[in-house]
Image (spheres, rainbow, N blue to C red):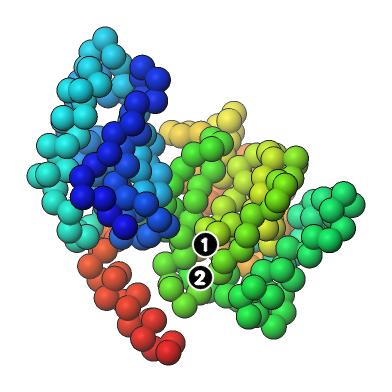
């Protein structure tokens, strides 16, 4: 639900958390991205960085150049000028990510966890059970059947939170309890209504369903698509998962090792929220 007014919370002396609403809602997230774009375009003196989240965003600033109170006032004014309506467009790249579903790396990770927690149902079977899917093949088809919206970035450099754009293809899954101490880099997981791609080997709690050989974070900036940024995704991008078999997966791995791999990125598209909401409503009605 969207709040009646912006809520501001200090994050130390150099950051502000700006909350627009609560819940895992696409419309709130789109307004977050519109406001972040407006704040960025305003070029406010002392602004250092902006980090979009699901229903909020973080502002990092230089307190020697602008005060907490003045920065909050500037953001409030931009929000009032923009309006609360969910309309408009944003530039939105479409990035295709190859995935080997039910691969040996994530399967080994799940089995290693189950040595200590044998009652844990293997991740793909648990997701199938919770979402009324008959088998792993059906899970793969559903997961790869929709584009995903990059709703938020954070927790770890390059980590993205992805919302399924087709409401009939959404999949839900609980997080691990307790979480894993290790997740392989490139693992594709589900938690709540979100999909993520682990950009590095980290602890984690999402249910694992596959692995991509295509990096989404490159700290050394070896690959061509990371020359301008260490992280592949930007807020407001869209992601499409492409199922691949072992031979194509291995070929991509080899090109990554050589430093010649290029991501499939379409960067000339614009996302219209008005047309999307009409389309999503039609999808839901057709599925009834």
| Residue denoted by label 1 | 193
Farthest residue, direction right:
115
Q: Disc 2 or 1, which lies upstream in sequence? A: 2
Q: CA distance from mark 2 to mark 1?
A: 7 Å
Farthest residue, direction top:
64
Task: Please report the residue visible at 35 percent of the width from the left and 39 percent of the height from the top.
Answer: 57
Residue 207 occupies quadrant: bottom right
Disc 2 + disc 1, Cβ < 8 Å = yes
Q: Secondary structure at mark 1?
A: loop
- How many residues crowd mark 2 within 10 Å: few (<14), some (14–19), many (20+)? some
Task: Please report the residue visible at 69 percent of the width from the left and 58 percent of the height from the top.
Answer: 208
Residue 184 horizontal/vertical position (percent):
73, 45
- Image quadrant where one finds the C terminus: bottom left
| Viewer-closest of 192 and 243 | 192
Q: Is residue 284 left or right of residue 62?
A: right
Q: Secondary structure at mark 2?
A: loop
**Eyeballing the image, is 29 above or below 171?**
above
Residue 24 horizontal/vertical position (percent):
42, 57
Residue 48 horizontal/vertical position (percent):
32, 23
Residue 266 occupies quadrant: bottom left
| Residue denoted by label 2 | 170
Is there any visible trace of residue 225 in the rendered image?
Answer: no
Residue 144 horizontal/vertical position (percent):
56, 70
Task: Please report the residue visible at 40 percent of the width from the left and 44 percent of the height from the top.
Answer: 53
């Amino acid at each position: 639900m969207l709040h009646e007014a912006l809520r501001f919370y200090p994050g130390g002396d150099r950051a502000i958390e700006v909350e627009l609403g609560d819940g895992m809602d696409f419309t709130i997230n789109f307004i977050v991205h519109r406001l972040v774009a407006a704040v960025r375009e305003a070029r406010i003196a002392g602004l250092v960085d902006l980090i979009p989240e699901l229903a909020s965003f973080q502002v990092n600033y230089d307190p020697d150049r602008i005060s907490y109170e003045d920065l909050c006032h500037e953001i409030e004014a931009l929000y009032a000028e923009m309006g609360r309506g969910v309309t408009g467009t944003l530039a939105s790249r479409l990035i295709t990510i190859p995935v080997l579903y039910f691969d040996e790396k994530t399967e080994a990770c799940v089995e290693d966890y189950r040595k200590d927690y044998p009652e844990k149902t293997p991740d793909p079977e648990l997701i199938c059970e919770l979402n009324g899917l008959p088998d792993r093949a059906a899970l793969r088809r559903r997961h790869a059947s929709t584009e995903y919206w990059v709703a938020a970035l954070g927790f770890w450099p390059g980590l993205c939170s992805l919302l399924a754009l087709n409401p009939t293809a959404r999949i839900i899954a609980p997080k691990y309890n307790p979480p894993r101490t290790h997740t392989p880099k490139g693992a594709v997981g589900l938690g709540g209504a979100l999909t993520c791609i682990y950009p590095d080997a980290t602890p984690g709690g999402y249910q694992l369903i596959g692995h991509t050989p295509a990096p989404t974070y490159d700290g050394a900036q070896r690959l061509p698509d990371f020359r301008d940024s260490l992280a592949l995704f930007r807020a407001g991008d869209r992601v499409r998962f492409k199922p691949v078999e072992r031979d194509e997966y291995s070929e991509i791995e080899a090109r990554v090792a050589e430093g010649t791999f290029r991501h499939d990125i379409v960067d000339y598209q614009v996302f219209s929220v008005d047309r999307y909401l009409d389309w999503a409503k039609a999808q839901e009605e057709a599925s009834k």
